[in-house]
Image (cartoon, rainbow, N blue to C red):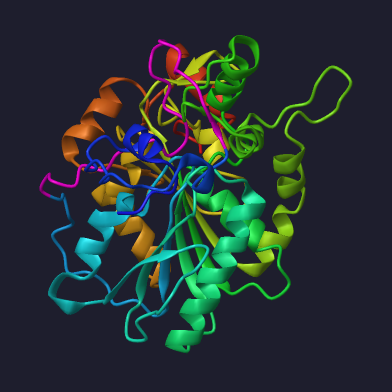
Amino acid sequence: MKIQGTPALRAELNPSLPTPASGSPPRSEVDSFEHAEPLRLPHLPLPSTRTPEVNRPPRLPAEPAPRLARPVLFVHGYMGMPEEFQDMTSWLTREGANRDGGILDGAEPGAVDPDANLFAIRYTRPWQTMETDAGELHNVIEAICQATGATGVDVVAHSKGALDTRKYLMEAAEKVDHVVMIGTPNAGTLLADVELLIREKLGRPMKPPIKDPEVHATLNQLRADRVDGKGIPLNPALRELNQNWETQRDRAEFLAITGNGIPTINEVTGVTFLGDGTVTRRSAAPEGIPARHAWFSVHGSLAGNQAVMRETFAFLTDQPLSATEDIFETPEDRARARDMGLVLDSKAPVSPSEGFLLAESGQEGRGKAGS
């Protein structure tokens, strides 16, 4: 696994990595960002913050994997890594159904296996702006299409990775057919606002614990899409991206997958159960596209959810999606959601607490807790 930056930074980002041998290049030759001691505050799970559990047994769907019609590119998000998609890759390559082409570097993709149809990108740094990441997506997608002869790719993106993909779709010569957005902050996340507040008011960066202009710019693109008292957007980059949503929808087919059942801060009620702990369901599921709501998986674990895998690749292989928008890994998860009053029977009367949930999600009258 390759992480850019100094040995100290690599250790901060992934303590499990071996310590580099002595004789590493001096800091000035490797990076230009300033380190700072992290503030000792409770952990805040910003978008895509996850260390994959590489040694645990994968939880894979029991059914055979579908054969893919087009190359698939896995795209990680802020502070993420391509290993987040290891379970999906394990399932899709089982019994030779598809071929893994490995991880391609965003800046220099290198040689691409012409017989493969599964690829993942590793951004040069995991905290880059949408503009920088869209440029690296361009590099990788062009390399895949040139090597395989495909006219386009399908993208499975976690969190900010889908915002990067949407930014790439604004290119006139884009080459994306389908996009699955998993836990994507399409309307931003208040946790980015919290991180910015801590950085700006207290001078103590947390995720990542470094001071770097690119990190600050990226967090500003992840903050909630709101306006100030004068009507000026606080997140102009995301506002512009959302104003061009119809263009992006015209260029690719989208599926949104949200996380649910995990307390998530929001602006309507303070805390909602319609979220994955980082991104609210309302932010993750834009209007006008199909959506599926996966229950009881936190933000960083959504890509390893069996139900998410099934819906993702049913969509990419033109198979029917589940009959209901709410999806569960186990019957016990479904029962738990019903017991909590978070998933409703369309024929049952709505209690006051359930009505509150419907109003919170903007889905009153639809017979279940929102989309």
Q: Would you say 110 lies left or right of 54 here?
A: right
Total number of numbered labels?
A: 0
- Using residue 76 as the reference point, say whether residue 60 is left or right of it: left
Q: Is residue 40 magenta?
A: yes
| Residue name at image x 71 percent, y 62 percent | 170
Q: Is residue 23 above or below residue 173?
A: above
Q: Give the percent coordinates (x, y) of residue 186.
A: 60, 42
Report x, y in % for residue 294.
35, 41
Q: Main secondary structure of the magenta part?
A: loop
Choose top left, top right, bottom left or bottom right for residue 1.
bottom left
Residue at (59% x, 30% y) in the render: 362
In the rendered image, the vertical position of residue 286 relative to residue 224, given as above or below: below
Q: Position of residue 297 (x, y in %)?
A: 31, 35
Residue sitting at the far right: 230
Outermost residue toward the bottom?
149
Question: How far across and how far down the image is residue 59, in percent?
Answer: 16, 49
Residue at the image point whose x is 44% and y is 30% from the top: 275
Using the image as rendered, state which of residue 137 and residue 322 is in the foreground. 137
Res 318 visible:
no
- Name the image quarter holding residue 326: top left
Residue in front for this viewpoint, 2 or 281: 2
Residue found farthest to the left: 57
Give me the residue at 89% from left, 20% from top: 230
> Observer-nearest residue: 298 or 202?
202
Residue extending farthest front: 23
Q: Is residue 227 visible?
A: yes
Q: Magenta region: which residues? A: 33-57
Report if residue 317 lies within the magenta region: no
Pick the residue in front: 98 or 198. Answer: 198
Task: Residue 327: name its quadrant.
Answer: top left
